[in-house]
Amino acid sequence: MAAWSAGRLDVFVRGTDNALWHKWYQNGWSGWESLGGVLTSDPAAVSWSSGRLDVFARGTDNALWHKWYQNGWSGWESLGGVLTSSPDVSSWASGRLDVFVRGNDNAMWHKWYQNGWSGWESLGGVLTSGPAATSWGPDRIDTFVCGTDNALWHKWWARVPTVRVHTKVLTTPNVAVGTVLQRMREVYGTVGVHVQHASTENLNLPALNDLDVGECVRGRTTAEQNQLYANRNNAGPNDVVVYFVRTTDPPFNGCAAHPDGRPGAVVAQGATQWTFGHEVGHVLGLNHVNDNNRLMTGNGTANITNPPPDLIAAERDTMVASPFTQDL
């Protein structure tokens, strides 16, 4: 069964002729219509948006077969695989479909649609039933199966916005790297953003240890900043690299101005425990605010009054929208 608008229900079954049959409710029940095919399992149906229905079933070749409605019914298409159960399907966003089946190895297998179909991936387990799947909201899927012990087993997926951070140390900071990372995790975690420390490296660059940062304005970097930020060993294009230096010139606790294509920040030796997360916040697009309860206070992180400081919903939206926050 699926619903693609308020007051609308669409019901799908396998008939005595093994075809897909359809009945719907909208201000009253329709008659039955045959949608054809030769099914060897019960169908599964979902709607990703108004006016759209997707139906899946196992065919006589044990592959997954798919039929959809959008301004009229499509034909059947094969999506391959070897199914030993009925499929189930869920949608957590418009244009997204996730299909789950039991394979011939009794593991759970997964195939998804987003701008095109994926291949099949194994999610493991030993199933004694077909899977059931549902989504309670954007970026969340829950699946349930019967295990070999006849108990109910549960597996779920949730998108986790993640900032991958690399640290490069020219001068050891007064507040340990592990501590500032933990403080960042505490604050970012309050808005559901994960922090992953991807690597660390010691750099011997004495000429850049007291770094000229100019006016420390986004989009404008000095020759010394450009030279320092070229050191991105192990970092991917959307990873953030933070460099620990002795001082900046002029003297700041940190500076998030960085060259295009080299997302990162510098943090001075004497910075506070909150500076690291504050500067990465700038890299993710956050601006200063005049509120000492907030991580992004423009009055200096030494003046934060309610540790751990706050991030607000609008800041989370900005952070998640940044190309430097990855879905991991």
Image (tube, grey):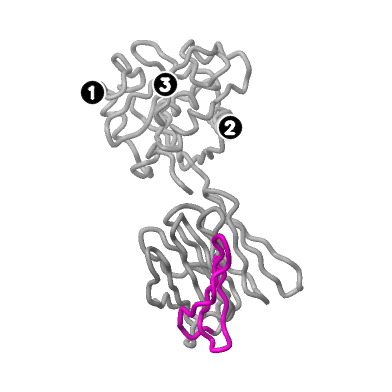
**In this view, the mark in front (2 or 1):** 2
Relative to residue 232, is residue 314 drawn left or right? right
Write the residue at 38% across / 44% down. Answer: 234
Q: Amino acid at mark 1?
A: Ala
- Location of residue 200 by image quarter: top left
Q: Secondary structure at mark 2?
A: helix
Q: Position of residue 139 (x, y in %)?
A: 52, 49
| Residue at mark 2 to residue at mark 1: CA–CA distance | 32 Å
> Magenta segment range?
10-39
Q: Secondary structure at mark 3?
A: loop
Label 3: how many Cα within 10 Å (few below 14, some 14–19, many 20+): some
| Residue at mark 3 to residue at mark 2: CA–CA distance | 22 Å
Inspect the magenta stretch and tell me whether residue 24 lies in it: yes
* Residue that numbered label 2 is attached to: 182
- Front position in the image: 202 or 59: 59
| Residue at mark 3 to residue at mark 1: CA–CA distance | 24 Å
Write the residue at 54% across / 19% down. Answer: 294
- Location of residue 148 by image quarter: bottom right
- Front position in the image: 288 or 44: 44
- Location of residue 30 by image quarter: bottom right
Relative to residue 243, is residue 18 drawn left or right? right
- Front position in the image: 285 or 100: 100
The circle drawn on residue 237 is: none
Write the residue at 49% across / 16% down. Answer: 297
Q: Position of residue 291 (x, y in %)?
A: 53, 13
Q: Amino acid at mark 3?
A: Asn
Label 2: how many Cα within 10 Å (few below 14, some 14–19, many 20+): some
**In this view, the mark in front (3 or 1):** 3
The circle drawn on residue 287 is: 3
* Residue that numbered label 1 is attached to: 223
